[in-house]
Image (cartoon, grey):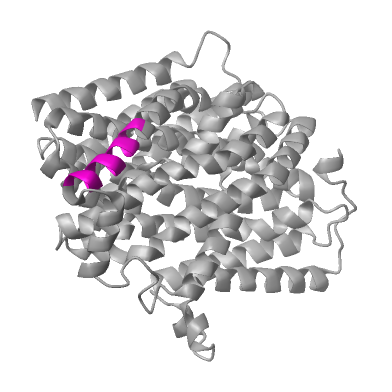
């Protein structure tokens, strides 16, 4: 236990040191704080964007989702790979437009494209509403990891508070650079830890990967397939579609895109990005191994499966390394999310109200406010990790139609239609989620196979319908706008 705690404390100290050190000696303007002065090279951009998949979802959520639902978890492999393919064309276009117009946030992109500061506020509210659950997810995961890896010497609540406070401190000082520098250590450690666990645990308990799946099939036939009524083929396809469309709608990934030094970075990285997905297979192996090796975890504790399995077969020293990797898996994306959320609030909500204010300073002051709200929610929210992730994806996906249409040479939508569609879509998601409604509840006339659709699809349909109707009703076409791809 002492060895495990010491290694996790050392990892945390290194993360905080790198986060503060990343500030450097240069004056901290808003552009430097929010998008790293657009100076990050290919390695940093790669780690910020491809490494985005290695969050607490990797350590806990994926293995927990496998433990609870089996083959339905394969959607994660599919959607991230498809999103990386899309990045080959999408990210260079976003980067060129942002560089040409000196944009520092996702909301700035919509403001410029649609010539509407009001739309920028709508985009900001939606982005923050999506990023806060994602940030809560990171802190919840951090709490679980520390509590388990410390053998309960540190409670989950204490870990959430300590991690949240330290995260808030170094993001306030260093902005995006904090995430960039820490991501190097994070990805190296996570790849090593995930690879080791995914190979060692199946071999230790079952002898080989093949024997693992044979044992799972014998004990729970069809478990490794889409075997449940509510998570069937239509749920799988619709969830892959929603998650693919929403992947690059995250405001913090816009910030990572804007931070690149040159356009060629994105096309080179897009070639390598999908290979990074292969490491997720190791987490799947651990999840399936846990189904038989640590059976009987309650539904609300499925996210503990990886750590419970590791603790039964590994020494405290190794558990300390696993816990350290998990800490970084929470802190690095957490830094990006906290940085971007605060920059959005300052630049696109506060700035219009106080045009002469120091916006960089306002962004830094927003960090502890957002951090405090996130810590509170992480201490009180009981949702499973992947469920939080799916909710957040459904929200940011509502930005997709307006963004893709804005890339056309002649945008057929005006800002009224774009904003109304976004609000209608996110309102639908909020209503369905709060009331626990499914596609079968709101559209019982659908064929049985379609009643499993991800509710994000229903919200996206509402979004598109409202977008079209409001644009027609206001009878104002958006002006012809050159695609950023031709700028």
Q: Which percent across, then down, holds residue 462?
A: 62, 73
User: Camera-side residue: 71 or 366?
Assistant: 71
Residue 197 in the figure: left or right of residue 462: left
Q: Is residue 99 above or below residue 57?
A: above
Identify the residue at image location x=42%, y=30%: 187
Q: Is residue 196 above or below residue 438?
A: above
Say which quadrant the N terminus sits in: top left
Q: Which percent across, then down, holds residue 46?
A: 56, 31
By secondary structure, the bulk of the magenta-drawn segment is best described as helix
Residue 419 in the figure: left or right of residue 164: right
Identify the residue at image location x=61%, y=25%: 42
Q: Is residue 75 above or below residue 319?
A: below
Rendering quarter of residue 265: top right
Identify the residue at image location x=75%, y=74%: 469
Q: Is residue 394 above or below residue 158?
A: below
Magenta stretch bounds: 192-204
């Amino acid at each position: 236990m002492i060895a495990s705690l010491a290694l996790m404390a050392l990892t945390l100290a290194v993360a905080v040191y790198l986060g503060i050190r990343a500030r450097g000696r240069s004056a901290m303007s808003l552009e430097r704080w929010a998008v790293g002065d657009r100076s990050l090279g290919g390695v940093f951009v790669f780690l910020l964007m491809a490494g985005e998949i290695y969050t607490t979802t990797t350590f806990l959520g994926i293995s927990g989702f496998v433990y609870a639902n089996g083959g339905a978890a394969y959607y994660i492999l599919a959607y991230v790979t498809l999103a990386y393919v899309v990045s080959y064309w999408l990210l260079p276009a976003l980067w060129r437009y942002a560089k040409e117009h000196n944009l520092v946030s996702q909301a700035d992109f919509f403001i410029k494209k649609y010539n509407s500061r009001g739309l920028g506020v709508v985009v900001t509210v939606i982005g923050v509403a999506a990023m806060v659950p994602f940030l809560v997810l990171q802190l919840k995961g951090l709490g679980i990891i520390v509590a388990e890896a410390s053998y309960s010497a540190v409670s989950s609540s204490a870990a959430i508070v300590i991690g949240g406070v330290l995260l808030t401190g170094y993001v306030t000082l260093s902005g995006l650079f904090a995430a960039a520098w820490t991501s190097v250590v994070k990805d190296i450690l996570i790849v090593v830890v995930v690879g080791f666990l995914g190979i060692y645990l199946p071999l230790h308990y079952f002898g080989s990967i093949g024997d693992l799946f044979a044992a799972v099939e014998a004990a729970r036939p069809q478990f490794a397939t889409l075997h449940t009524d509510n998570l069937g083929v239509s749920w799988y396809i619709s969830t892959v579609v929603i998650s693919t469309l929403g992947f690059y709608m995250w405001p913090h990934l816009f910030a990572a895109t804007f931070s690149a030094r040159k356009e060629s970075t994105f096309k080179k990285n897009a070639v390598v990005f999908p290979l990074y997905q292969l490491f997720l297979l190791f987490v799947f192996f651990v999840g399936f191994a846990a189904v038989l090796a640590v059976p009987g975890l309650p539904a609300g504790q499925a996210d503990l499966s990886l750590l419970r399995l590791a603790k039964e077969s590994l020494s405290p020293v190794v558990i300390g390394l696993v816990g350290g990797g998990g800490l970084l898996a929470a802190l690095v994306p957490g830094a990006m999310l906290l940085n971007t959320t605060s920059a959005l609030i300052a630049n696109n909500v506060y700035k219009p109200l106080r045009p002469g204010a120091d916006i960089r300073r306002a962004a830094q002051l927003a960090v502890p406010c957002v951090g405090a709200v996130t810590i509170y929610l992480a201490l009180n929210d009981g949702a499973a990790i992947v469920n939080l992730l799916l909710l957040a994806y459904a929200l940011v996906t509502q930005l997709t139609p307006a963004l893709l249409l804005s890339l056309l040479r002649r945008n057929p939508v005006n800002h009224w239609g774009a904003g109304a569609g976004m609000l209608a879509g996110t309102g639908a998601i909020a209503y369905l989620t709060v009331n626990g409604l499914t596609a079968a509840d709101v559209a019982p006339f659908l064929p049985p196979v379609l009643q499993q659709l991800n509710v994000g699809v229903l919200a996206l349909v509402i979004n598109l319908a409202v977008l079209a109707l409001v644009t027609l009703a206001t009878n104002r076409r958006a002006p012809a706008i050159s695609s950023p791809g031709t700028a």
